Structure formats: C-alpha cells, structure tokens
Amino acid sequence: MKLLALFALVSASSTSAFVAPRPAAPQNSALQAAPTNIEKLTNAATVAAATITTVVLASPLAAIAEDVEDDYVYGNVSAPGGIGLAVGLGVVAILTAAVPVVLAPGEDAYNEMKERDSDKWGR
C-alpha cells in the first residue's frame, strides 16, 4: 500500500497532467521564436523522472511476482462456491413471485368490506 501511494505521488509530481496548459502568446508578426533550451530541458527532465520512477517502483514488484508459490495441482477442478448463492437467490425469486398469492385473501376481504359498507362511504 505504501509503495502504491509513493508511486502515485512521484508520478503525479513528475507529470503535468493536472496543470492547466499555458495560454499561447498572440503572434503579431511572421517571425517565430525558437523554443528555448530551458523548455527542452524541462521536458527531458520530466520524461527522465517518469522513466526512473517506473523502473525503480516496478523492480520490487517483479521480485514479489517470482516469490509466489504455486499451490495448483494440475488436473484438479476447482468449482466456484457460488452454488449456495444461486439457490438462495432462486428461493428469494420464488417467494417474491408468491407475494400476490399470499396477499390475495386480504384484498378480497377489503373489497367485501367496501361493498358491505358502501352506504357509509363517500358522504
């Protein structure tokens, strides 16, 4: 985690992705100035810093990748353990579909009371 945070900070500080671009100067003449050496040097320094950061931070990852022991036995089949989840979701779907059937007697009783007491309603 610390390595990832360090990589993010170094990468963000060495790039200009989060900096607003400088507005171009208006050109009133046909003559154009050549880019100064400091601008070329700044670009080269940014690219070099990003390259060095990537190389330095990626080298420990390669060592970690080689350290992992392979516990896999070839020929074994490892099925996912999601069968219980599928059965549970199936039962929930069936119960959800049964809700109108379970509530039907209550609705019938409501309609019966409404018809019986229709003379008392809507006064």
Image: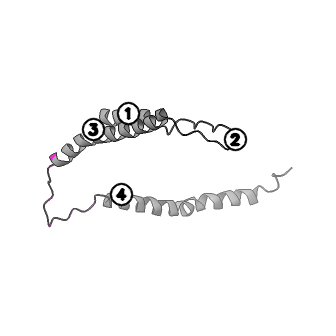
What's the amino acid at mark 1? Val
Q: Which residue is mark 2?
A: 29
Give coordinates of residue 117: x percent, y percent: 77, 55
Image quadrant in which you'd find residue 23: top right
The relative height of residue 77 versus residue 3 in the rendered view (above or below) is below
12 inside magenta stretch:
no
What's the amino acid at mark 4? Leu
Residue at the image point whose x is 49% and y is 35% from the top: 39
Count up the numbered dots.
Answer: 4
What's the amino acid at mark 3? Val
Q: Nearer the viewer, residue 67 or 47?
A: 47
Magenta-tinted stretch:
67-80
- Element under label 2? loop
Res. 10 mark? 1
Residue at the image point whose x is 44% and y is 58% from the top: 92
- Element under label 1? helix
Measured Cα–Cα span from mark 4 to mark 1: 43 Å
Counting residues from the start of the chain, the first of labels 3 and 1 encountered is 1
In the displayed orientation, state which residue is furthest to the front: 31
Counting residues from the start of the chain, the first of labels 4 and 1 encountered is 1
Quadrant occupied by the N terminus? top left
Counting residues from the start of the chain, the first of labels 1 and 2 encountered is 1
The relative height of residue 118 versus residue 22 in the rendered view (above or below) is below
Measured Cα–Cα span from mark 3 to mark 1: 11 Å
Q: Which residue is mark 3?
A: 56
Horizontal side of 49 relative to 111 (left or right) equals left
Residue at the image point whose x is 41% and y is 63% from the top: 90
Residue at the image point whose x is 46% and y is 38% from the top: 40
Marks 4 and 1 in Cβ contact (< 8 Å): no
Counting residues from the start of the chain, the first of labels 4 and 2 encountered is 2
Measured Cα–Cα span from mark 4 to mark 2: 73 Å
Give coordinates of residue 26: x percent, y percent: 68, 38
